[in-house]
Each structure stands twice: as structure tokens, then as C-alpha cells.
Image (cartoon, rainbow, N blue to C red):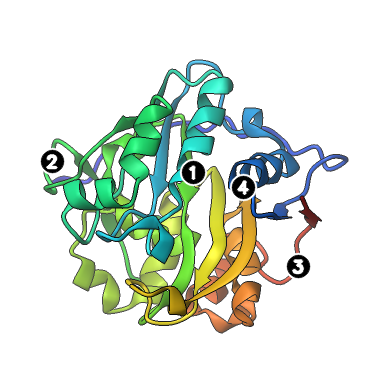
Amino acid sequence: MAVASFGLAARRLLPLDTGSGAEVGVVRSTNIEAAVKQAVEMVGGIGRYVGRGDVVAVKPNIAFNSPPQYKATTDPLLVRTIVDLCFQAGASKVYVFDRTVSNPKLSYVTSGIQRAAEEAGAKVLYVDDVTSKLYKKISVKDGIYLRDTLVNKHILESDAFINLPVAKQHSTAGLTIGMKNLMGISGDNRSRWHWDIHQAISDINMAVKSDLTVVDATAIMTRRGPTGGSLSYLKDTDTIIASAGVAQADAEATLLFGMKPQDLGYLRLAEEKGLGPIGSYSRKEISL
């Protein structure tokens, strides 16, 4: 498969009005829909990311065949709310998908994400095989470990890419949040990434920009991640985090685990590679 000659679609991200917005918005609430809407508004509103006629790619974590209450996957209500906001902003199409670890047809249904996304009007795409029809190889400029990578064409051809991770402990990466969620846009052999996972995670995030990251931290998985499987592994935090900067969103989420952003190798590398500061950024926090 040849390296694609085209680059990522031009993004329409507008300057943030620093008088009314922040780099990171944090909302504490048991009302997920209200918290998502408020968090997005705090970082400029959906119109900063999605315009009339745009095609939007939405990437939740749907990796496992797990019910939503176990938080191995992104909350379906968060997905539905984001899809609703995209259409309210004038999006022409919204695609929702992930390259799952478990069987996609089971994972999409068991997680509740397929139903939530389709009810909101999104097109849900199954990723069964890595083919040249679905994936394009792109070069990773200044990549340290990944010099090239296969990327789902719906990401490359979209006008806006919205990253919807769930925050949880991960046995090899430490935590999986927004930056690691991009493993699901790649068609690479997963074991390839695990040889040097922190470099790989930071490299893919240099090549593919998440225009908006909204983190499901309503209940965080503090152990036995990333699969979990018991409510006893969870800690209720009732938090939604939004940011145009995926590294900043992840940095904020680490605090919920009693960690510092610098504790994660890929976050340290993200800062070194110019993906933004992880220790100092403007933030707003409210409780609903």
C-alpha cells in the first residue's frame, strides 16, 4: 500500500474567544447531556469545530463487547449528545466508528453506542477488515517510532474529527484517554504499537489532529483496565472534560486518577513534540 499523496482535510478551527472560553472545560454533574453541552460551550461552542455542510468523523472508544455501566467504552449518551450538536451546527454527515478489539457488531450493540448514534442521525460504520478501500497510508512527519501509519479514510476526508474517549487505567500505557484513543483510527498491527507504545501514541497524534476531544470521566476505571468487567473497578467522578487540545484534555483527566500529567510517557512526549503544554493551560471548571 503506497503512502498517500494527499494530506488531512483542511480544518476549520476558529480562534478561541479568550474572554468567554478556556483551553480546557471541566464540568462536574450527574447529568451527562447537560455536562457535555456545557463543557463544549466552555471551549468555544460546537460552531468553533463544525460548520454548515461539514462531514464529521466521531471516534468513541467501542473497543470491547462490554455494557456501558462497566465503562470499558464511551457512554452512549455522550456520543448521542455530540452527534446532536454536530447536526445542530449544520453538519451534513456524521460518521461514528472504531476499530474494535472485540467483534465490532457485538461491541457496537452491547456498548449502546450504535443505537445512540443512529437515533441521533449518524451513520455507524463497521470496521471489519483493514483494506486499501478503507485505509490510506500516510507519512508521519517528524515521527520517532511511527514513520508511516494506516489511517481510516473517513478521518482523512472529514472536515472535523471529534475524539470521544473514556478515561480508564491501561495495563501498558498507564492510562488510556484521548491520545491513545487514536489507536482505533489506525489499521496498523496493534502489536507494532505496543513495542514502543508511548512513542507510537505521541507520533499518531502529531499526524492526525483531534479537533475536539470530549472525555467521558463520569466513572473512571482505576484498575483492571482497559477491559474491566466489574463495578468495583470504578470510581464515580461525574466529570466531563472538553478541549481542542487532546494533550491538555488528557492532562486534566490524569488528575482524577491522583496522578500528574508528567507520570504518563506519551504525555511527556506530546509536550516535547509540540502538542501543547501539559502542566500549564487555561481552564474553567463548574458544577451543575
Question: Looking at the image, is mark 3 or mark 1 earlier in the sequence?
Answer: 1
Q: For numbered disc 3, what is the local secondary structure? A: loop
Q: Residues within 10 Å of mark 2 (few under 14, many from 20)?
A: some
In primary-sequence order, the first of circles 1 and 2 is 1
Label 3 sits on residue: 280
Task: Read off the residue under disc 4.
Answer: 244
What secondary structure is found at the residue carrying circle 1? Answer: helix
* Residue type beneath disc 4: Ala
271 vs 194, left or right, is: right
**Quarter of the view holding residue 230:** bottom left
Instruction: Please tell me which residue lies in front, 4 or 235.
Output: 235
> Residue 207's x, y, as percent?
41, 52
Q: Amino acid at mark 3?
A: Ser
Q: Could you say which is closer to the camera, residue 141 or residue 286?
A: 286
Q: Earlier in the sequence, mark 1 or mark 4?
A: 1
Residue 248 shows which numbered tag? none
- Cα–Cα gap, marks 3 and 4: 15 Å
State the image coordinates of residue 233 (x, y, percent, origin top left): 44, 78
Of the two numbered discs 4 and 2 on the same chain, state the one appearing first in sequence.
Answer: 2
In space, the residues marked 2 and 3 are separated at their CA atoms by 41 Å
The image shows residue 230, relative to residue 73, as above or below, that is below
Q: Nearer the viewer, mark 1 or mark 2?
A: 1
Asked if residue 38 is positioned above or below residue 69 in the image, the reply reads above
Left or right: 24, with 231 as reference point: right
Marker disc for residue 77: 1
Please state if 214 lies on the left or on the right of 83 as rendered.
right
Which residue is nearer to you in this view: 108 or 53? 108
The label nearer to you, 4 versus 2, is 4
Circle 2 residue? 132
Identity, as a three-letter code, of the amino acid under mark 1: Leu
Q: Is tag 3's residue or tag 4's residue first in the polypeptide sequence? A: 4
Mark nearest the camera among 1 and 4 is 1
